[in-house]
Amino acid sequence: VNGKSIKKLQKKCNVIVGILENKCKKLNHYFFINQVYKRPYIILKWSQTKDLFINNENYKNGIQKISCKESQLLSHKWRSQADAIMVGKNTALFDNPKLTTRKIKGKNPIRIVIDKNNILPKTLNIFNNESKTLILTLQKTNNKKTNLNFIQINQKNLLLDSMKKLKKRNINSILIEGGRILLNSFLKENLWDEVRIFTSEKINKKGIKAPDFLISKNNKKLKIGSDYLYIIKNKNINY
């Protein structure tokens, strides 16, 4: 560990290190993020219109379906591969999502919601029995449900503190599907490892703007149904 074995070997024989180092890091990037930063591998995901909106003006009436069927299926596949999925309070309240893997066969991720003051109605879909739910709150809260747990977090460094506490619960990868405010918060703090963006051909003209993230012309895009998918790694994260 930490090179001690290499040093022991070097006393007895010639040791070559660094062979295929970048490929090894790429293959095990989740593990390295977990070990070096003591937090989950963080994936930010959203769907946006061609003119860069993630919802229409009537966001309080629920989420606007922007991405195509093929993109939705892929999103559910990603859910099945992640340990957890996170949204903010407003997304949970206005969209009332289930945050489960329904469109394909696969495990449901642990559902995580930031609800600082613990005010969300317990009738929302995130509180059903289809999967476990964790509520990140500033309040000290007692719980009587087996599938529902509360984690008390600190206002200072709230996101990083939350991620580190989730890692202690063996959550090694997390998919952030929140709204503009939550996604921008992660971006602003450079607290992300990968961004996955579906861009549709739809035009909104008005509504909720997409997160403040610039897609470079050099970024590769994949055709998914009628949408385009961008998968972008954070080059400012080193391990």
Image (cartoon, grey):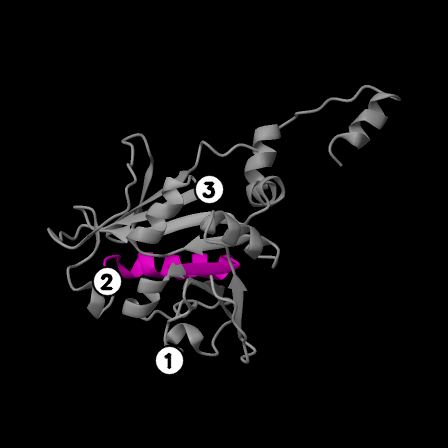
The tag earlier along the polypeptide, 3 or 2, is 2
Q: Quadrant of residue 33?
A: top right
Residue pointed to by mark 2: 65
Tell me if residue 38 comes above or below residue 18 in the rendering: below
Q: Which residues are magenta?
A: 64-86
Do the CB atoms of the residues marked 3 and 2 lie less than 8 Å apart? no
Residue pointed to by mark 1: 123
Name the quarter where the N terminus is drawn: top right
Q: Is residue 71 magenta?
A: yes
Amino acid type at circle 3 is Asp
Q: Is residue 144 magenta?
A: no
Amino acid type at circle 1 is Thr
Q: Position of residue 196 (x, y in %)?
A: 37, 47
Q: Quadrant of residue 77?
A: bottom left
Between label 1 and label 3, give the one nearer the viewer: 1
Tell me if residue 183 comes above or below residue 26 in the rendering: below
Q: SS for tag 1? A: loop
Amino acid type at circle 2 is Lys
Residue pointed to by mark 3: 193
The tag earlier along the polypeptide, 1 or 2, is 2
Tell me if residue 73 comes above or below residue 159 in the rendering: below
Rendered residue at 43%/75% (across/down): 127
- Residue 74 shown left or right of residue 64 in the figure: right
Q: Position of residue 228 (x, y in %)?
A: 28, 46
Toward the top, the furthest residue is 14
Depth check: give the residue in front, 45 or 78. Answer: 45
Q: Residues within 10 Å of mark 3 (few under 14, many from 20)?
A: many
